[in-house]
Image (cartoon, coloured by chain):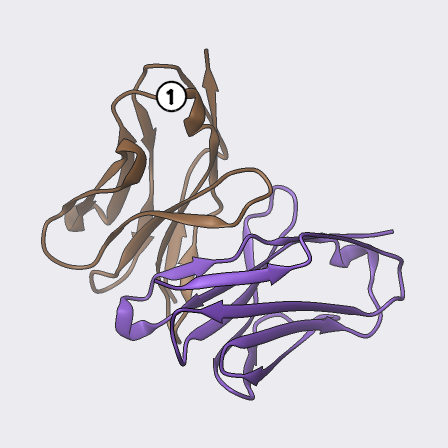
Chain colours: A brown, B purple
């Protein structure tokens, strides 16, 4: 079964600093990969996705992620954190049987 | 794109009472539908998913059940709520043919007292 690993449940970043959230997947073939963001008491919103083609994927709100097959990684970055980036972020990959496999999430705190 | 509607937004129910949460989908036909639960600090737990009317797969044995009476309607139910059923419930929809991504509803915050 597919699985996704996100290390560090809480991530603190200073306003204006680089945001880096790590995601590693387990798969014998390149999967479809996703990053979602969740604001308090809201549903998940798709930030970006990788299917095929270009390995650097740009999403909403200035985020991007790079698919690296050799490292089985799909890390999420944003050059300069804003206060509005404070939220929980989930990495996901296609699982079996029409499902997505989600990581445990990273709670991002932005320090002014 | 798909829009997922859920209601109510918040719900407070006593232990032993029944539950019915409804999810409807707009903007697509024949979607796969999913119910997830988030407990504090525990990520997303897939409870049920459905690939069509009347077709329900259960991921975790528990006090809950799901039904899909119509193509774009997905219902989560319980006959008798437990304290452990408290959490944030999310409905999602997706289609494999559209790339596996799932669209999420706004969620229902359930507190069992």
Residue at image location 49% in from the left, 62% down from the top = B4
> Residue A100, how many percent across, how many down?
40, 63
Q: Chain of mark 1?
A: A
Q: Residue furthest top?
A: A112
> Residue A106, how many percent across, how many down?
46, 37
**Residue A44 shows in the view:** yes
Residue at image location 39% in from the left, 64% down from the top = B2
> Residue A107, how many percent across, how many down?
50, 33
Q: In this rendering, is residue B33 above or below A100?
A: below
Residue at image location 48% in from the left, 33% down from the top = A87
Circle 1 — which element?
Answer: loop
Quarter of the image holding residue A76? top left
Viewer-nearest residue: B96 or A8? B96
Q: In this rendering, is residue B83 above or below A73?
A: below
Viewer-nearest residue: A111 or B93? B93
Q: In this rendering, is residue A97 above or below B15?
A: below
Instruction: Please state, as top left, top right, bottom left or bottom right, where the N terminus of chain B lies in the image.
Output: bottom left
Q: Residue furthest bottom?
A: B54
Q: Residue furthest front?
A: B27
**Residue B61 shows in the view:** no
Q: In this rendering, is residue A19 above or below B52?
A: above
Residue denoted by label 1? A82
Residue at image location 20% in from the left, 59% down from the top = A51
> Residue B9, how many percent across, how many down?
67, 52
How many labels, in total?
1
Q: Residues within 10 Å of mark 1 (few under 14, many from 20)?
A: some
């Amino acid at each position: 079964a597919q699985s996704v690993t996100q290390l560090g449940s809480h991530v603190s970043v200073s306003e204006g600093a680089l945001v880096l959230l790590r995601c590693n997947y387990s798969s014998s073939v390149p999967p479809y990969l996703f990053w979602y963001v969740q604001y308090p008491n809201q549903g998940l919103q798709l930030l970006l996705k990788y299917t095929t083609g270009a390995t650097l994927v740009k999403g909403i709100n200035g985020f991007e992620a790079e698919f690296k097959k050799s490292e089985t990684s799909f890390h999420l970055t944003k050059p300069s954190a804003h206060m509005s980036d404070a939220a929980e972020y989930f990495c996901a990959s296609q699982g079996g049987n029409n499902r997505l496999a989600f990581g445990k999430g990273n709670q991002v705190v932005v320090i002014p | 794109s798909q829009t997922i509607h859920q209601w109510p937004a918040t719900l407070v129910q006593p232990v032993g009472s029944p539950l019915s949460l409804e999810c409807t989908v707009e903007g697509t036909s024949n979607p796969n539908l999913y119910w997830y639960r988030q407990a504090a600090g525990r990520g997303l737990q897939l409870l049920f998913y459905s690939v069509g009317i009347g077709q329900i797969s259960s991921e975790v044995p528990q006090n809950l059940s799901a039904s899909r009476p119509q193509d774009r309607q997905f219902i989560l139910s319980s006959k008798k709520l437990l304290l452990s059923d408290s959490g944030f419930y999310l409905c999602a929809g997706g289609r494999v043919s559209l790339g596996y991504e799932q669209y999420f509803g706004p969620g229902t915050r359930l507190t069992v007292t």
